[in-house]
């Protein structure tokens, strides 16, 4: 009933209980045979296009979608329902800082700090780190995290910007976390480079949320095209882009397919993040190959297919599943200016490189960011786990400066 099936092995076919669902995995396919009695089983089988009593082959992905689409769509719907309730609550009792920022709408002009930070010469990749404790489908990705400390680590490693996930229920952090990281970055005001711009990553569906992000010190917001081009959306993508511009904020528009990419371009987006995540299943649309450590490609509507469709005046950012050095380099070679790295760098930041030639206290998250940024070769790069933690080619050419 929770969208999952139990595989039941019947050792004696003559005594098989025909009330069960038998799941057989063979040659990369899943065969499902539904036998009588349980109504919810019949509903499930019908939902994925199988006939009762017959064996039919379906791909793993189709089965996964059929088994969990209702559950996962309810997750997305629950998030949006909760956001609407939060918005109504905030509008009925506006925080003082939000009220003050509303008065400035139209008088603020963006300095394009995110664009300037990530747009480099061809062959160079910028890294936008994403700070979160969990995801809507992963309860915990780290034991503990000090946002201000990890923000300073990302600055020292050479990240171009920091994206803070501000939906506490979905990601474990909120706008207080964003304020903390912005405050921590301000300590680098007299340094070169200066403070990293902070991006608010949330499910933005109303301009009042953008006002809240601006009031908390965000330099940009991430707008999800999937949510905003939906016919049921109160505020469309163009309206939300306009709201961000009126508050002096940049907007990174997250897209997942050609329709969303076309809508983002038509709305005037200049920063477009192509997500490698299937929003219906919350799984990677193009997973990483376990042998080559590269994204499996090419599929027409994945990160590799969509980047070539974007016009030249758009800066492309790759999002989702960037957890290997070779993946980052292959995305750079495909035309991306930056990658968003979340779970991988958070997990790596909890590890230490004890026993290595570098300082024992050196944080592996830093090594990962530096390895991504380096001008390494996909062809000659190491397809091994060492590259994950910044210990391979690329990391070595930059880590030496840390030891001095």
Image (spheres, rainbow, N blue to C red):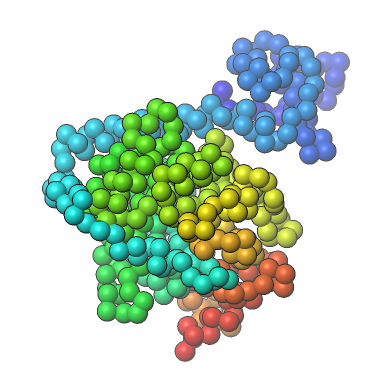
Instruction: Looking at the picture, tell me which residue is in the foreground, 296 or 54.
Output: 296
Q: Residue at x 26, y 65 (%)?
A: 183
Q: Quadrant of residue 44?
A: top right
Residue 16 point in image, percent of width and height: 80, 17
Q: Quadrant of residue 293?
A: bottom right
Vertical order, 37 against 32 (above or below):
above
Residue 102 or residue 63, whichever sits in front: 102
Residue at x 68%, y 59% (from the top left corner): 294
Rendering coords of residue 76 (x, y %): 45, 34
Left or right, 161 with respect to 27, comes to left
Q: Is residue 302 left or right of residue 161?
A: right
When the figure is inspected, residue 231 is found, relative to residue 28, above or below; the finding is: above
- Furthest toward the bottom, the residue is 404
Q: How many marks?
A: 0
**Residue 282 seen anywhere in this rendered image of the structure:** no
For residue 31, say whether it is visible. yes
Using residue 98 as the reference point, say whether residue 340 is left or right of it. Answer: right
**Which image quadrant: the N terminus?**
top right
Residue 336 placement (x, y as % from top left): 55, 61
User: Where's residue 375, x and y in %?
Assistant: 59, 75
Give the residue at x 82% y 35%. 26
Q: Is residue 155 above or below residue 134?
A: below
Residue at position x 53%, y 48% from top?
A: 275
């Amino acid at each position: 009933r929770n969208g999952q099936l139990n595989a039941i092995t019947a050792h004696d076919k003559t005594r098989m209980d025909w009330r069960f669902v038998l799941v057989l995995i063979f040659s990369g396919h899943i065969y499902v045979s539904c036998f009588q009695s349980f109504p919810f089983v019949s509903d499930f089988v019908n939902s994925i296009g199988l006939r009762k009593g017959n064996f039919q082959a379906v791909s793993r992905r189709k089965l996964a979608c059929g088994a969990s689409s209702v559950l996962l769509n309810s997750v997305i719907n629950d998030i949006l329902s909760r956001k609407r309730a939060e918005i109504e609550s905030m509008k009925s009792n506006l925080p003082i800082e939000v009220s003050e920022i509303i008065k400035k709408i139209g008088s603020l002009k963006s300095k394009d700090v995110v664009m300037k930070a990530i747009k480099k010469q061809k062959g160079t990749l910028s890294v936008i780190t994403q700070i979160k404790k969990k995801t809507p489908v992963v309860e915990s990705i780290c034991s503990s995290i000090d946002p201000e400390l990890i923000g300073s680590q990302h600055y020292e490693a050479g990240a171009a910007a920091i994206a803070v996930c501000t939906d506490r229920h979905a990601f474990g952090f909120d706008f207080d976390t964003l304020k903390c990281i912005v405050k921590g970055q301000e300590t680098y005001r007299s340094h070169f480079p200066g403070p990293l711009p902070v991006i608010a990553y949330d499910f933005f569906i109303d301009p009042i949320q953008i006002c809240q992000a601006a009031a908390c010190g965000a330099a940009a917001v991430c707008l999800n095209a999937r949510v905003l081009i939906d016919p049921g959306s109160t505020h469309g993508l163009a309206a939300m882009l306009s709201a961000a511009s009126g508050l002096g904020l940049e907007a990174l528009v997250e897209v997942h397919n050609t329709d969303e990419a076309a809508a983002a371009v038509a709305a005037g987006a200049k920063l477009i993040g192509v997500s490698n995540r299937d929003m219906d299943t919350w799984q990677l649309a193009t997973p990483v190959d376990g042998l080559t450590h590269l994204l499996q490609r090419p599929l027409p509507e994945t990160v590799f297919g969509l980047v070539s469709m974007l016009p030249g005046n758009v800066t492309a950012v790759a999002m989702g599943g960037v957890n290997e050095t070779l993946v980052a380099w292959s995305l750079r070679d495909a035309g991306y200016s930056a990658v968003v790295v979340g779970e991988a760098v958070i997990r790596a930041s909890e590890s230490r490189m004890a026993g290595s030639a570098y300082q024992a206290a050196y944080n592996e998250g830093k090594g990962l960011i530096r390895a991504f940024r380096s001008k390494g070769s996909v062809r000659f790069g190491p397809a091994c786990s060492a590259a994950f933690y910044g210990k391979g080619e690329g990391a070595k050419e930059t880590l030496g400066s840390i030891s001095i």
